[in-house]
Image (cartoon, rainbow, N blue to C red):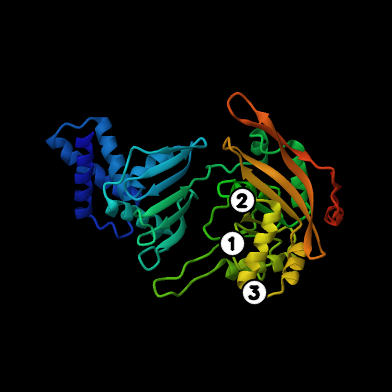
Amino acid sequence: MEDLQELIAQVRQILSDRIDLTRRISDEDVRSAIADIIAERSREQYLSIKDKKTIMDGVFQSMRGLDVLQPLLDDPQVTEIMVNGPDNIFYEKSGELYRSTVHFRDQKRLEDVIQNIVEPINRQVNESTPIVDARLKDGSRVNIVLPPIALSGPTVTIRKFPESPLTISRLIELGSLTPQVANFLRDLVLAKFNIFISGGTGSGKTTFLNALSNFIPATERIITIEDSAELQIQGIPNLVRLEARNANMEGRGEITIRDLIKSSLRMRPDRIVVGEVRGPEALDMLQAMNTGHDGSLSTGHANSAKDMLSRLETMVLTGADFPIEAIRQQIASAVDIIIHLGRLRDHSRRVLEITEVLSYQDGEIRRNPLYRFEEQGEDDKGNIIGELRRTENSMQQTEKFRSAGLVCRI
């Protein structure tokens, strides 16, 4: 195997000498050039068909793919890949974290792979801009942090997404939802309730947002706004996808989520779907929800439904000097429903709470919990047994159901 690795390095060097890989060259032309070099080397020493394929894949992956990460990326059971410098690669598979036995040849090779990731989407990452969010061709989300910020060497985190987005039906099969709750959520989307999906890192917020989006009628015009495009909304012909842009090396050309939300209001949207709100753009999102753009959807990091409301307050305060009472009134008026997701100790992802957001009263935003996850124990494999159960509370704000010709089921 060491001989083959050396051969891969030699073929790669010959390829670099022969063709200018900085020019736009198709993958087919690169493979053809590699095949020619392999054919030349096979005249000097015997190479089996398996050896030739290994060399071909190794060289191509190092030039156009993600080098030693490519097999992990191609494994459908791997959901996350974490690179902490050239020698420390970890991955999550079936909910468990493992350390990989492979590593990059050196830090320079890892840096080359990082440039292969950011260049196709016109993003830059270097010492002056050491942090960037990006995406791969398959939609996987990538976060990159370079030295001197990353003390252990270039750090890359890849969050993979399934080729086919999860549907509500699949979430029911996985035990994340019951059919009754799924029907209720479908009616919420059809009736144009404004919905926030909250949860911690890795709780499945984007996946759940995708699933909910599939309930949007195909006749509507949808604008999606994201830092890095991840959403896979299907079945909507009139779909506009917008993606934020970082500033260039001169500090110009930045397009923020906030800019895109403001622009989307002039694009005649029926709904606005923001992949995630993290900062001052929360104010623009709330204002959009309050000015006739019902049915909007978004996600945010929080530890509970109550915490999501507090986080929204903090986000708005970062971009506007409003009295806290005014902010809370704005939130209470804009957000109708919060769906809180969590990742349990058995690594399963569940809906933990569905809460109705009521009015602002006596200095607080009133909430009305409708569903809560109740744990009932564990099976012999350590899997948590439990389900999302109705509380004793009835839904109070049902006007949107009536306007949509629907009946409130709870």
> Where 22 sits versus 76, above or below?
below
Q: Is residue 217 visible?
A: no
Judged left or right of residue 198, residue 347 is left
Which residue appears farthest toward the top when viewing the image? 380
Q: Position of residue 392 (x, y in %)?
A: 84, 43
Q: Secondary structure at mark 2?
A: loop
Please tell me the numbered disc located at residue 278. Answer: 1
Element on which disc 1 rests: loop
Mark 3 element type: loop
Q: Residue at x 46, y 53 (%)?
A: 142
Disc number for residue 243: none
Tell me the residue at 74%/36% (across/down): 179
Counting from the top left corner in percent of width and height, residue 323 is at 72, 74
How far is mark 1 from mark 2, CA to CA? 21 Å
Residue under label 2: 233
Q: Residue at x 16, y 41 (%)?
A: 40
Q: Quadrant for residue 346, please give it.
A: top right
3D distance between C-alphas at marks 3 and 2? 32 Å
Q: CA distance from mark 1 to mark 3?
A: 14 Å
Dot 1 or dot 2: first in sequence order is 2
Of 92 and 142, the residue lying toward us: 92
Q: Quadrant of the C terminus?
A: top right
Q: Nearer the viewer, residue 182 or 380?
A: 380
Q: Nearer the viewer, mark 1 or mark 2?
A: 1
Looking at the image, tell me whether mark 1 or mark 3 is earlier in sequence order.
1
Residue 143 coordinates in the image, percent (x, y): 45, 55
Q: Which residue is mark 3?
A: 320
Task: Please name the amino acid that badge 2 sits on.
Answer: Ile
